[in-house]
């Protein structure tokens, strides 16, 4: 009498986690995790800016941590992959109620893309290039805000010094933010080796 062999087929275990149900590859799920963590860094910057830093004024200026975090992430990740992130983050900034106006959506997106492309094209990849590009993008962002608000009549030309103080005041936490963003940027594969 012949014995029958047991069937060797075993169905896969059902995935119980959220990312398993999305049918993503391992690299795609790590890339998704990276952008979620970048978003959380931006939300934390927005929270710190609104709750803590808005109380401290130096020469009539406060920080702009959220645009600085978005600029740093976009410059670090490059122009191609950060375009959608800059647009989504600037829309979040507008609807959070913290932005000066709806024109921030365009300003943050445009300066994020321009200075990330500038860094890729002309500068070596490193800490000083990132800080330089973030400071330049903050400077152009603040000056553009000042120009728009002067045109709309919501500020006077006397407050031009406040733009420069805001850029310098916002630059203080950037050296602390850089290693965090660099570690998060390595999740799912490095865009650049820094």
Image (cartoon, grey):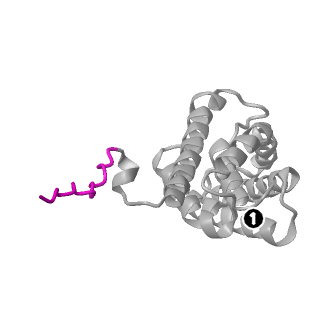
What residue do we see at 60% from left, 55% from top? 188
Residue 104 to residue 44: above or below: below
Q: Residues within 10 Å of mark 1 (few under 14, many from 20)?
A: many
Most foreground residue, 62 or 125: 125
Residue for point 57% across, 40% down:
46
Picture layout, residue 149 above or below residue 97? below
**Quarter that holds the C terminus:** bottom right
User: Quick one: quadrant of the N terminus?
Assistant: bottom left
Q: Circle 1 sits in a helix, a strand or a loop, which is it? A: helix
- Percent across and percent down for residue 81 are 61, 66
77 part of magenta stretch: no
Quadrant of the rendered structure where residue 11 is?
bottom left
Q: Is residue 28 visible?
A: yes
**Where is 8 relative to 16, above or below?**
below
Seen in the picture, residue 20 relative to 165 is either above or below; the reply is below
Name the residue: 70% across, 36% down: 62
Residue for badge 1:
115
Residue at the image point whose x is 36% and y is 45% from the top: 17
Q: Position of residue 132 (x, y in %)?
A: 84, 55
Whether residue 12 appears in magenta in the rendering, the answer is: yes
Viewed as shown, does residue 70 lie left or right of 43? right
The magenta segment is 1-16
Asked if residue 66 lies left or right of residue 124, the reply is: left
């Amino acid at each position: 009498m012949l014995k029958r062999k047991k069937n060797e087929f075993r169905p896969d275990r059902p995935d119980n986690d959220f990312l398993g149900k999305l049918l993503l590859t391992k690299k795609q799920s790590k890339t998704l995790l990276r952008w979620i963590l970048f978003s959380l860094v931006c939300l934390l910057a927005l929270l710190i800016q609104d709750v803590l830093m808005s109380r401290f004024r130096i020469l009539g200026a406060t920080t702009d941590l959220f645009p600085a975090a978005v600029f740093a992430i976009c410059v670090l990740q490059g122009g191609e992959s950060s375009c959608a992130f800059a647009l989504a983050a600037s829309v979040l900034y507008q609807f959070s109620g913290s932005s000066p106006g709806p024109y921030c959506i365009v300003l943050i997106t445009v300066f994020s893309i321009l200075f990330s492309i500038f860094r890729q094209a002309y500068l070596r990849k490193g800490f000083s290039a990132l800080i330089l590009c973030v400071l330049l993008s903050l400077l152009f962002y603040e000056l553009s805000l000042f120009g728009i608000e002067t045109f709309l009549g919501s500020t006077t030309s006397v407050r031009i010094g406040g733009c420069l103080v805001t850029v310098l005041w916002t630059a203080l936490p950037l050296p602390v933010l850089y290693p965090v963003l660099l570690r998060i940027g390595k999740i799912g594969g490095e865009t650049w080796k820094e």
